[in-house]
Image (spheres, helix red, strand yellow):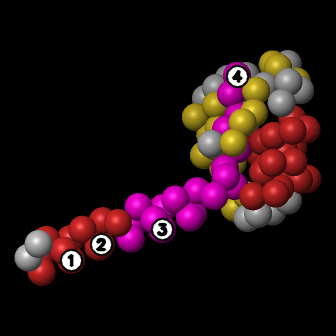
Amino acid sequence: MCNARKKIFEIHFNCIYTFSQMAMKNVVLVKNLAPETRERDLYDVFDRYGRVLRINHMKTYALITYEDHRDAGDAVRDMDGKRLEGNRIHTSLA
């Protein structure tokens, strides 16, 4: 393999490895949100499990990123099947 191709492969591999390390199960997928659910509502409910770094809210689902993967696991276990804004939500690790 020539040096240029080897370098591209190394960069690509490192990016994938870094991405997989970042996605170390510290992201919670929340499905079946009520359309009126606000990002602030999600923060108020999910912040009690640990430090929330980011919330990506898209109408009926959200991705909640925790600082610690253990907090994400706690949130999934406790919140799956609970009601939020009238809807029964479903949670899983993303």
Q: Nearer the N terminus, badge 2 or badge 3?
A: 2
Residue that numbered label 2 is attached to: 11
The residue most toward the left is 2
Q: Position of residue 47 (x, y in %)?
A: 85, 53
Quick one: label 1, few (<14), some, or many (20+) residues within 10 Å? few
Q: Amino acid at mark 2?
A: Ile
Residue 46 visible here: no
Quarter of the image with the C terminus is: top right
Using the image, determine if residue 87 lies above or below residue 91.
above
Q: Measure how far apart labels 4 and 2 are at the Cα level.
A: 38 Å
Q: Measure how far apart labels 1 and 3 are at the Cα level.
A: 16 Å
At horizontal 67% and vertical 38% (from top left) the residue drawn is 29
Q: Measure how far apart labels 2 and 1 are at the Cα level.
A: 6 Å
Q: Nearer the N terminus, badge 4 or badge 2?
A: 2
Q: Amino acid at mark 1?
A: Lys
Residue 29 highlighted magenta (yes or no)? yes
Q: Amino acid at mark 4?
A: Asn
Disc on res. 64: none
Left or right of 18 on screen, residue 50: right
Residue that numbered label 3 is attached to: 18
At horizontal 83% and vertical 56% (from top left) the residue drawn is 71
Quarter of the image with the N terminus is: bottom left
Using the image, determine if residue 34 lies above or below residue 15.
above
Residue 6 visible here: yes
Asked if labels 3 and 1 touch by Cβ distance under 8 angstroms, the answer is: no
